[in-house]
Amino acid sequence: MAERKPLVIVNGQIQQIQAGDTLQGISNPTIVTLVNGNANAVVIGSPVYASAAGTVDLAQADDINTSEVVGLVSDASVANGANGSIQTSGILIATTGQWDTITGETGGLVANTVYFLDPSSEGKLTVNAPTTDGHLVSRIGKGLSTTQLEIAIQPPILL
């Protein structure tokens, strides 16, 4: 079998990987710790926005002030006023039941389906992009399986 070298980009130029160089692997998810500013506990998969310095609240796509999603809750549950983990990139894994709570669907996520911030319910995701004037389209990520969401948050677009 022939030896093959992968192609890489160095200073904007494509070339074969050089001896001693390594390939950059898939990065680990980015997780930040912030305080839950919602009056209730927030659960895994809930999209949140920065409501104050170091504080998050449940995001919703019906208002510009609540539609700038910073990440998804990655702890099973975070009580009001408690520190919690917010995942801003990577693949978030939750059970089908946990995703059903966030999407309002059954059976978990749908593979190869894009999820958006819901304009009707705070802290929820939907497969239907908003279409109503005044709402915002905020792409959150794509389902990879019934339990995995690849987080790829995009800035909201006002309709």
Image (cartoon, helix red, strand yellow):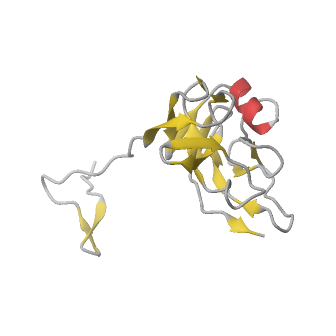
- Position of 60 with respect to 87 (left or right) is right
Q: Is residue 159 above or below residue 21?
A: below
Q: Position of residue 159 (x, y in %)?
A: 78, 70
Kindly give the residue lying farthest to the right in the view shown. Answer: 132
Q: Position of residue 58 (x, y in %)?
A: 67, 42
Q: Residue at x 63, y 42 (%)?
A: 57
Q: Position of residue 106 (x, y in %)?
A: 82, 30
Q: Residue at x 49, y 44 (%)?
A: 90
Q: Give residue 42's quadrant in the image.
A: top right
Q: Is residue 124 above or below residue 16?
A: above
How many marks overall?
Answer: 0
Camera-nearest residue between 119 and 51: 51
Q: Is residue 55 visible?
A: yes
- Position of 20 with respect to 76 (left or right) is left
Q: Is residue 80 above or below residue 119?
A: above
Q: Position of residue 70 (x, y in %)?
A: 55, 50
Q: Is residue 29 visible?
A: no
- Position of 33 with respect to 23 (left or right) is right
Kindly give the residue lying farthest to the left in the view shown. Answer: 20
Q: Residue at x 76, y 31 (%)?
A: 100
Camera-nearest residue between 35 and 74: 35
Q: Give residue 76's quadrant in the image.
A: top right
Q: Residue at x 28, y 48 (%)?
A: 1
- Position of 68 with respect to 62 (left or right) is left
Q: Is residue 68 above or below residue 97?
A: below
Camera-nearest residue between 15 and 125: 125
